[in-house]
Amino acid sequence: STGPSDLVPLCSLAHSIGPRRILEIGCHLGAGTLSLALACPQARIVTYDIIPTAGRLIDESEPATRDRIERRLMSFPTDEIRLRAEAPYDFIYVDGDHTEAGASADTELALDLLAPGGIIAWHDYCHRGHEWIYKTNCVPEVLAALSQRIPVRQIAGSWIAAWRKPSR
């Protein structure tokens, strides 16, 4: 779950560009989703998760907030055709599959769906004990490889990394 040391910079980053469309990959309880909704009251949010109970905090939120959030219960990459037919997203938050293959697939599709001038942010740009030993979090390695193509930067004091797509 995304804690305050990551939610504050994440929401500040999103708020700074005034997004109209936000995409979240990996909803979990919905704390990040709701935080982004509150930080960006003009935005509609689409969130993906494969866990049937994901987003239970969204269910408990105020209707005005909840009505701006569309929950999609499925794997993000499996919905590629629909996503590519939709308008691009101004802000994308990637906190889904942390395996190397999963993080790579989520990242590549998210990069394609990002609007010019938009920001993509990744969570878990760090290693914590067992995750490093058992390679259950490959986000740092995926982003290290990606940074050979684009300038991915870590937000100081957080486990968030981000990149802003140039405007046309």
Image (cartoon, rainbow, N blue to C red):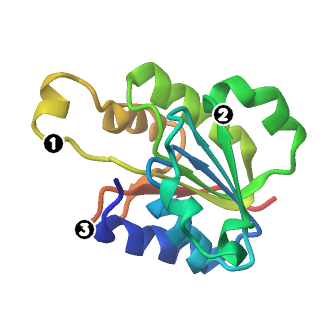
Q: Residue at x 50, y 71 (%)?
A: 35
Q: Circle 1 is placed at which residue position?
A: 128
Describe residue 113's horizontal placement relative to residue 99 as left or right.
Answer: right
Describe residue 109's horizontal placement relative to residue 86 as left or right.
Answer: left
Say which label, 3 or 2, has the lower sequence index: 2
Note whether 143 is above or below 12 in the view shown: above
Q: Circle 3 is placed at which residue position?
A: 157
What is the crowding at mark 3: few (fewer than 14 residues within 10 Å), some, or many (at least 20)? few
Three-letter code for the amino acid on which mark 1 is drawn: Arg
Q: Residue at x 56, y 33 (%)?
A: 106
Query: Which x, y percent locates residue 149?
Result: 53, 38
Three-letter code for the amino acid on which mark 3 is drawn: Gly
Secondary structure under badge 3?
loop
- Tell me, for residue 109, which label it has, or none: 2
Question: Which quadrant is home to the C terminus?
Answer: bottom right
Q: Residue furthest right?
A: 85
Using the rendered view, name the quadrant where residue 3 is placed.
bottom left
Note whether 28 is above or below 3 in the view shown: above
Query: Which x, y percent locates residue 6?
Result: 35, 65
Secondary structure under badge 2?
helix
Three-letter code for the amino acid on which mark 2 is drawn: Leu
Cα distance between the residues tagged 1 and 3: 15 Å
Cα distance between the residues tagged 3 and 2: 27 Å
Query: Which x, y percent locates residue 1?
Result: 34, 53
